Image (tube, rainbow, N blue to C red):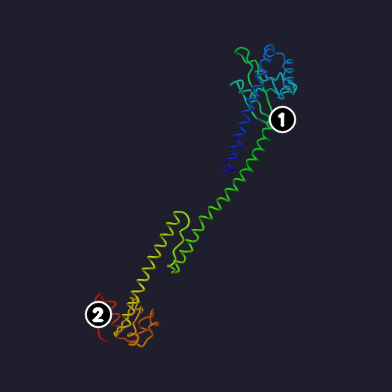
Amino acid sequence: SILAAVWYASSALQGFFLDQAVDDLQARAHLLENQLRPYLARLDPAALDALCKEAGRAAGTRFTVVLPDGRVVGDSREAPDQMDNHVDRPEIRAAAEKGLGTSIRYSQTLELRLLYVAIPVRHGPDVIGLIRASLPVTPIDRQIRKLQLRMAAGGLVIAAIVALAALLVSRRLTRPIERLVAGAEAYARGELGEPLPTAGTLELEALGAALTRMASQLHQRIQRAEHQRNELETVLSSMREGVVAVDRTEQVISLNAAAAAMFDCDRQRAAGRSVQEVVRHLAFQRFLKRALASAEPLEEDV
């Protein structure tokens, strides 16, 4: 955005300076118009050329007088008879057709980039000649470059300030996010007791509060499940009857102390193993298969 602003400002300044230069050259050409009209009316090339050279020295401007057919009859710097026909010059064509012609191009004669402004000279309704005033645009380009460098330097300073401010703001935003991420990772490890930090933006505070509520509810549910499991373990451990729980693949889920004593096995090692490894009793294994395949409760003595 800073580069775009610098480009736009420099373009606007260049356009402003060129417009001012066009207005200035047009005013100088109009000042010379009344002096040239009598000589153009009677077509006095020598007087026209002498007047152009005198006015050019006084005004510091190059003046060129061109007839409607493009022939040069006066110039403040060159001999008119040694100059090319100017009928194809864009500023001459535009001045003859619209009353004002402007052009910026490189001059092979002066080896400079020049701004040309041409106006017609009328005698009654007829155009009897054209006056062209020109100035080098190198000073304008030089001033534009200086302004561009100043604006670029100012833009760099602004960019540095904005970058520093953006860094501070981003750190202010990312630190609460990093704390939220660390807290969420702690929750994932099962550390549900600590509340998440809520400093930061309103959105981050709302997110932290929601995660804290979720962790609190999850912690309560885990505690209830553990309490229920402990109660069940207590009931099963106190039973004289042996209880064995298996899944559909005949893997032992759990068994109580009475069942471990009946089958002479280790409770801790039995969990997760096949019931055939834990209970080596063929009738019991057959009964278990029938029970797993049945939709109704089964009862049998073995």
**Residue 141 in the figure: left or right of residue 275:** right
Tell me the element at label 2: loop
- On the image, which quarter does residue 108 sit in? top right
Which residue is under mark 2? 298
Asked if 213 appears above or below 294 in the picture, the reply is: above
Question: How far across and how far down the image is residue 23, in percent?
Answer: 63, 25
Q: Residue at x 65, y 15 (%)?
A: 128
Question: How far across and how far down the image is residue 261, in percent?
Answer: 34, 87
Density class for disc 1 (Cα within 10 Å; few <14, some 14-19, many ≥20) is few
Q: Look at the image and tell me in which quarter the C terminus lies.
A: bottom left
Density class for disc 2 (Cα within 10 Å; few <14, some 14-19, many ≥20) is few
Question: How far across and how far down the image is residue 294, in percent?
Answer: 26, 76
Question: How far across and how far down the image is residue 274, in percent?
Answer: 37, 80
Which residue is under mark 1? 108
Q: CA distance from mark 1 to mark 2?
A: 114 Å
Q: Residue at x 36, y 88 (%)?
A: 264
Which residue is at the front of the view, 176 or 141? Answer: 176
Callout in the foreground (1, 2): 2
Q: Residue at x 67, y 23 (%)?
A: 133
Q: Look at the image and tell me in which quarter the N terminus lies.
A: top right
Q: Which is nearer the N-term, disc 1 or disc 2?
A: 1
Q: Residue at x 44, y 57 (%)?
A: 205
Which residue is at the front of the view, 221 or 56? Answer: 221
Tell me the element at label 1: loop
